[in-house]
Amino acid sequence: MARDRTGGNTVLLLLSFCCVFLLLLSLGTFDGFAPLGESTQQRAQAQRMKAVTKAQTLKLAIVIDEDKAHTTQILHGVELAVELVNEQGGALGKKLELVTLQGAANQQLYCERVQQVCDQYEVAALIGPLSTDTLSSARALTQFAALPLVSPVTVVPDTLPVLQPDNYVTFFPALSLWVEAVLNHMHGHGVQNLLIISPQSGSYGDIFSAALERSAGNELEQVLRINFQEPLRMRELRRAIVNYDLLHAPDSALLFAGEIEDLPELLELLSQVELRDVPLYGTDNLVPPLGYALCSEQGTFYLPEVSFTAPFARYEEFVTRFATKYGYTPDFHGVLGAECIFALAQALEDEGHYDPVAVVQALKALTEPQPTLRPAQQQSAQLHPTSTSAHGVQIKVMPVPAFVPAKE
């Protein structure tokens, strides 16, 4: 007599399905489905809250992702701010501890360093990134690990994806302030034709150029843009610049959005094609760092200058201590590095406990820019101001001599 195996086979199939389901669940395959339990990010948040609360110090980390003058100054600002906060007792009854990871000279090494920080759940926040080029990678890694990402100097590009919850906050003045300051200055000096020289896609200079191009296109008569691959080479730009006849008109100007290392090459090219008298604008990438000397190779050179109309409470003490400790006066890079630490400590004190999501929300409330007015909206008494300001920061464009690396 044959036995009916249908019932037994059904049980085996159900058991097999349950085993596969539990295996996939343990691997995190269903993290995105809330009914099945907490997501990986939520588990990381709970784990980080527990580890930070239990730790003897409030540990902060910074990854040095570029070997440039402004990153050194940011690090100096962060270090001194940690020292000043600890002199006042720290935050949440704990002293701050700064962990510095050096040597992230390329994208792969930078991501490895960031992942090292993410894996340390006792770290309360990562100060960075220090370059817009690495923002997307840093934001993705730290968001997955529920680690607040607090940057002094990165901008938010239009292409940055939306993340929930968003763990990233920047203290860098909104890009619109920089663009408005440049355009306001151009309006005041009768500029109608603009040639933008922009570096490769994805860089800060490219993001700045795109924002300026969009705004200037509606206000100037003609706006053209040419891109170059870094490092800048004269032969690649010569034809485009020579063929742009409007540069010889009195109402024309150039804007260079590249790095300071490429500036001497551009100045040499402008000298060779007899365009030294054309007004040349730069971005904050060209703010002279240490090791650069001023000279007068270019006839008229304009750079943005940042001042703080409402800096943090210990600003004057910070600048004095900074100059004494490091032997030079900080510009906005060092100040914004310190601002991250002071604001983070204050946010923790205001919350009364550590919660990575709540900390980021509190910091965002401090850094959201207020709307500013375009020239057409200004009062007649100040039709074309040369500066824009919002949320305690003022940016104005100032004439300065062009500069090249100091000779040894």
Image (tube, rainbow, N blue to C red):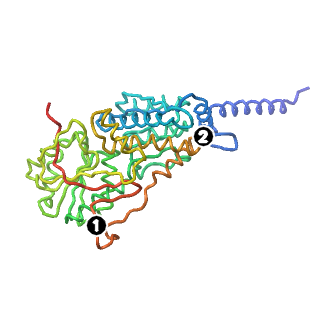
Nearer-the-camera pick, 382 or 216 = 382
Which residue does the image show at 44% across and 29% down from the upper left? 113
Q: Quadrant of residue 19?
A: top right
Q: Which residue corresponds to mark 1?
A: 219
User: Looking at the picture, how far across and down is residue 396, in whole percent?
Assistant: 28, 56
Q: Amino acid at mark 2?
A: His
Judge whether 233 appears above or below 13 on screen.
below
For this orientation, the residue located farthest to the bottom is: 380
Query: Where is the C terminus found, in terms of image quarters?
Result: top left
Q: Amino acid at mark 1?
A: Glu
> For mark 1, does the 10 Å Cα neighbourhood hold few (<14), some (14 to 19), or many (20 or more) residues?
few
Q: Label 2's element? A: loop
Tell whether 270 sits left or right of 45: left
The disc label shown at residue 353, or none = 2
> For mark 2, does the 10 Å Cα neighbourhood hold few (<14), some (14 to 19), or many (20 or more) residues?
some
Nearer-the-camera pick, 176 or 383 = 383
Q: Mark 1 against mark 2, which lies toward the viewer?
A: 2
User: Looking at the picture, how far across and down is residue 346, in whole percent?
Assistant: 51, 44
What distance separates the C-alpha of mark 1 from that of mark 2? 49 Å
Q: Label 1's element? A: loop
